[in-house]
Amino acid sequence: MLILLQQRLELRRFDEASTETDAMHVTLRQLEAFTTVARHLSFTRAANELNLSQPAVSMQIKQLESQLGQALFEQMGKKIYLTEAGHDVRQYARSILQQVDDLKAGLESLTGLERGTLSISVATTAHYFAPKLLSIFYERYPGVNVKLDVTNRESLISQLENNTVDMVIMGRPPEDVDVESGAFMENPLVLIAPADHPFTREKSIQLKRLENEVFLVREEGSGTRKAMEMFFAQHGIRMTTGMEVSSDEAIKRSVQAGLGLGIMSRDAVQNELQLGLLSVPDVLHFPIMRHWYVMHRKGKRLSPVAQAFKGFLLEEAAPILNKDPSSRPSATQPQSAAPPASQPHAESPVGEKYAPAKPKYVLTGPDGNPIPPAPRK
Ligand code: PGA
């Protein structure tokens, strides 16, 4: 703000004959001195209020008058009065200074988390849990305005590349974009089948038997599809693909309708499993163990709101979403009562390690002091 006050406000007359010599150089300091003198109608009292010498105040007024080409005060006897031009300038000066104060308050509230925008993009599959997290974040910072985009992995990577978003939530950081990433929660991909599929009556099914099944797959560019293809390739299993469907919801309906099997984040199928509309057969090497990551371009200057949200995800998302075991069962817990016959397939970790017990994320303001979150309602 001080820098702003000291900066020169350059006003130019944009008339046809405008030349460099027409430029007016009016400073906020001059306007402040002027409005103070106009209020007191005394250079001495204005100087006291502004903590300046009287000649310094007179100098500011003289410079302002010379820039405007008008006398702003006239002296009669021992008293000074505003001229007609002085009255006009006073109105404009007040309004300019008021706007500068508003600007200052706006910037302060932005840095104070009272207001501000969070622009976040999440993988299609992450939209099953992102709104719950956002609603808790909103409760704490009610003035924050969130822009949420839901799209697939490929377009998230291009948003990261073009730096058009504060941060992204997806299944695994891209290899070819320089990002800072942190895993904040497990993301097991499960095999889904119709509720009455013969597999549901068996235990410890060999992976090889999946070669006799047809799989519904997400569109090219989907992270889920990529993980699924890698999983089958790593285990040397030939995958027969049926329909390509660009929505998790449509895949679930198609699996229910008997069009094939699917592989999907467990976050996306909670409701269907609870309602008994789908099943998760006990096939060896499942689930495919992944993680949810929050990430942004390396070196990006995050706004206080974005920093707060990142800290919130890294520290609190997993405990919040895992609190109710019925809505988000432990990732390694099998759907059937039998113990798992094999280790789940784990993707190698990337970026920061998933560490729910890490020390509290401290959000600091520009002065380096911690900014406390608004209390929970
Ligand atoms: P998807 O993303 O919605 O593109 O499949 C999930 C992921 O990033 O793993």
Image (spheres, rainbow, N blue to C red):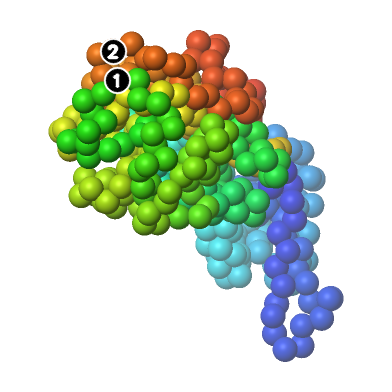
Instruction: Name the residue located 50 percent from the left edge and 10 percent from the top edge.
Output: 357
Residue 314 vs residue 150: left or right? Answer: right
In the image, the residue with mark 2 has its CB under 8 Å from the nearest atom of ligand 1: no
Q: Which residue is mark 1?
A: 203
In front: 176, or 116? 176
Measure how far apart labels 2 and 1 are at the Cα level: 8 Å
Residue lying at 31% horizontally and 36% vertically, measured from the top left: 192
Q: Residue furthest bottom?
A: 16
Q: Is residue 160 above or below residue 63?
A: above
Q: Is residue 254 visible?
A: yes
The location of residue 180, given as percent across then percent down, is 65, 34
User: Residues at badges 2 and 1 in contact (C-beta under 8 Å)?
Assistant: yes
Helix, strand or loop at label 2? It is loop
Amino acid marked by disc 1: Lys
Residue 338 - label: 2
Frontmost residue, 100 versus 370: 370
Q: Please name which of the two marks, 2 or 1, marks the residue nearer to the observer.
A: 1
Q: In the visual, does 72 lie left or right of 265?
A: right
Residue 340 falls in image quadrant: top left
Ligand 1 within 8 Å of disc 1? The answer is: no
| Residue at the spot 70% in from the left edge and 34% down from the top edge | 51
Observer-nearest residue: 280 or 224? Answer: 280
Residue 347 at x, y percent in the picture? 56, 28
Q: How many marks?
A: 2
Classify 10 Å Cα crowding around label 1: few (below 14), some (14-19), many (20 and above).
Answer: some
Whether residue 44 is visible, yes or no, is: no
